[in-house]
Image: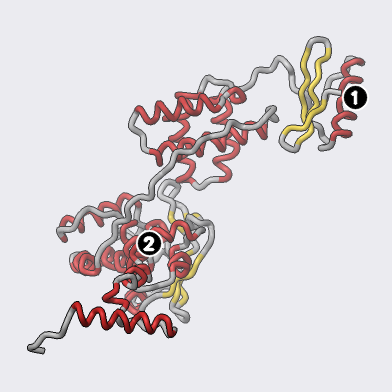
Amino acid sequence: MATRKIRNTWWIDFRFHHTRYRKRSPENSKRGAEAYEVLLRQRLARGEPLTGAKDPTEKMPTFEQFAWKWFDDYVKSNNKPSEQVGKKCILSASLIPFFGPMPIGEIGAHDIERFKARQFQRGRTNKTILNQLTVLHKCLVTAYEWLQLEGSPPKIKWPKCTTPEIDYLSPEECDLLLRHAKGIVYEMLLFALRTGMRQGEIRGLQWSSIDWLNQSIAVRHSLDNHSRTLVAPKSGRSRHIPMDSDVYEMLYRRKKDTGYVFLANEGRPFSNYRVHYAITHLCERAGLRKIGWHTLRHTFASHLAMRGAPLNAVQSLLGHSTITMTMRYAHVAPSTLRSAIDMLNPKNAIDADFGQQVGNRWIDAQRKESAQKYPPSKNA
């Protein structure tokens, strides 16, 4: 019996009249696979077609053939429009030019390493290569599942990416930026600095998402720049953000029941390009370095951390799915590390009270030694 178990799945693999037949057993057990092989051999002996069997002469699809099928059948139905655009760009610009003519089941770890080496030679960053490999990995995993390929997808050694530096505005820079802003742009800037919402979440904010009684905002939507439709937030989950008094008063003055909260002069929602142009032009007028809207989100989180807000609270307000992303702001938070280091200095330890007899005797000795080394001034 030519049965074997591959990755917790039982397969049959045998030859009949010089033709190889390899299929997954419908019953995932050794006994079930053996019975399935006997059934197929009997059908072949009688000259009957194998229901659902693949034509052994059928060629394995190339990466390019399968990649576009995967994009149409999987990516379009499971990813947001902006994510679809990103994956399509990665496929057409980098993956298909390299892996395109290769049979999908014959792509190995060495091929992937050659692809990484070429990308490094072209000056691509680790983050860019990581994004490309993520798309490649998902496509290969789907191919092994859909085509029932033998074995498992090749392992990928992921490039290491350093955490990017976070740019944020000081309180003085925030005031400077707001002083040069007017109208709806001023409102959006103040709103971003006090709520930390993403640009798409601000552009897609609805009046119906504002709870006036509890003075909070329900973040349920984000305005997708490609499809110009409302989609779920980046994390896929809604969250609630309390409004401070300035934001509450600013919005209450032009309160409505339905529609977008922030609209351009012609009464349409802001586009990604338009808000980017607005903040770039505003930075030039204010004499500030060039920043993007995401810098305002970093500013919101950094100021909270500097004022001692718990990082799990910052995580909840930002809508991060894991605390790992929020830990980027830990370096600006007040820390006990400085006080711990200061305790090692004998001058600082003199005034410490450990509440133990041994510790107190040590303190007394240190005080006497310090008095000898640093006698009081005669003029004191």
Q: Residue at the far top: name it.
A: 18
- Asked whether disc 2 touches disc 1, contact meaning CB atoms under 8 Å apart, the reply is no
The one of 110 and 212 positioned closer to us in this rendering:
110
Question: Which residue carries the number 2 mark?
Answer: 329
User: Residue 342 sits in which quadrant?
Assistant: bottom left
User: Residue 253 sits in which quadrant?
Assistant: bottom left
Q: Is residue 67 left or right of residue 359?
A: right
The 10 Å Cα crowd at callout 2, few under 14, some 14 to 19, many 20 or more, is some
Q: Earlier in the sequence, mark 2 or mark 1?
A: 1
Structure colour scheme: secondary structure
Q: Is residue 170 left or right of residue 302?
A: left
Instruction: Give x and y (percent) for residue 332.
Output: 33, 64
For image coordinates 36% across by 64% down, the residue present is: 262
For image coordinates 43% across by 55% down, the residue present is: 223
The one of 138 and 202 positioned closer to us in this rendering:
138
Disc 2, SS:
helix
Q: Is residue 48 left or right of residue 199?
A: right
Image quarter in which the N terminus is found: top right
Instruction: Give x and y (percent) for residue 130.
Output: 45, 39
Instruction: Give x and y (percent) for residue 377.
Output: 11, 85
Q: Amino acid at mark 1?
A: Val
Instruction: Give x and y (percent) for residue 249.
Output: 34, 79
The one of 327 and 44 positioned closer to us in this rendering:
327
Between marks 2 and 1 in the image, the one whose residue lies nearer the viewer: 2
Image quarter in which the C terminus is found: bottom left
Q: Is residue 272 above or below residue 7?
A: below
Q: Amino acid at mark 2?
A: Tyr
The tag on residue 38 is 1
